[in-house]
Image (spheres, helix red, strand yellow):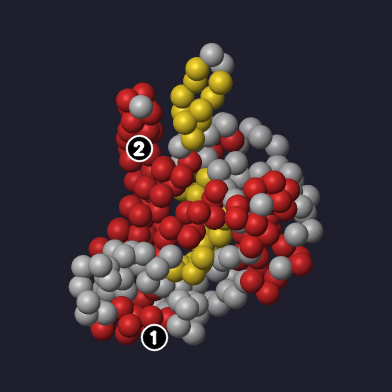
Amino acid sequence: MQSYFVEIQRLLNKVFEQEQGQIESASKIIAACIQNGGILQIFGCGHSHLLAQDAYYRAGGLVPIRPITIEPLMLHAGALTSSKNEKDPSFIKNHLENFEFEQGDVLIVISTSGCNPVPIDVALLGKKAGITVISLQSLEYQEQQTRHESGHRLEEVADLVLNTHIPVGDGILNLHGVQYGPASTVIGSAILHALFSQVIESLDMDRLPVFQSANVSTNQTANIALIDQYKDRINFE
């Protein structure tokens, strides 16, 4: 147990030291998006989608966040199915109805390896729509060949990269040659919530678009007003 805490803290410190500039740049882009009426859309497959869900409708978190949900890419629909679909070069072409980008939005695409077709296709859709695309990925995988027909990896498509520094294989521990102790969810979540906190701190708005916990106060007037403000773009039902 102690070894995992030691290694995850080491990796958190590395991200803090090396990614501050990129997080600051991303926060300015997202803050401008929100102040101009846009929303932040987040996409990931499999375990990466868990991070998109984690950011959505979160007490203490940003309100204008829309996770892009495609069930055949999610773990509850079948882990093997999700993994297979992420590698399918024709998958996104059959699910274009899930994408509703508008001018001024920002898209975050999450993919630890950055090599599979579906996340790259989603990033390309964002670029085609003329919105800023940010990737959350590990550049430790940079030498891994892309599976995308264009020959490009995710970091080559994104406008800005947030590097998780996750080692190839995800595990940060090793015993008898077996890699274990996955870190991508912990580090990815830390980066995203640090980013969102920076966005909130830099917003110049009379009413900050932040959800208050329903478990702290029964007065949900502020939350109801914020939901009403964004309900045409984000499904909170």
Q: Nearer the viewer, mark 2 or mark 1?
A: 1
Q: Which residue is mark 1?
A: 228
Q: Does any portion of residue 176 appear in the rendered image?
A: yes
146 lies left or right of 198: right
**Foreground residue among 153 and 39:** 39
- Residue flagged by tag 2: what amino acid is it? Leu
Q: Which residue is mark 2?
A: 12
- Residue flagged by tag 1: what amino acid is it? Asp
Question: Image point 30% across, 59% down: which residue?
Answer: 197
Local SS, label 1: helix
Q: CA distance from mark 2 to mark 1?
A: 36 Å
Question: Image point 60% across, 36% down: which residue?
Answer: 142
Residue 26 to residue 138: above or below: below
Q: Does any portion of residue 31 appear in the rendered image?
A: no
- The quarter of the picture where residue 220 lies is bottom left
- The quarter of the picture where residue 210 lies is bottom left
Q: Residue 175 at x, y = what percent?
A: 50, 17
Q: Residue 218 at x, y = what percent?
A: 22, 77
Residue pushed farthest top?
Answer: 176
Q: Residue 118 at x, y = what percent?
A: 68, 55
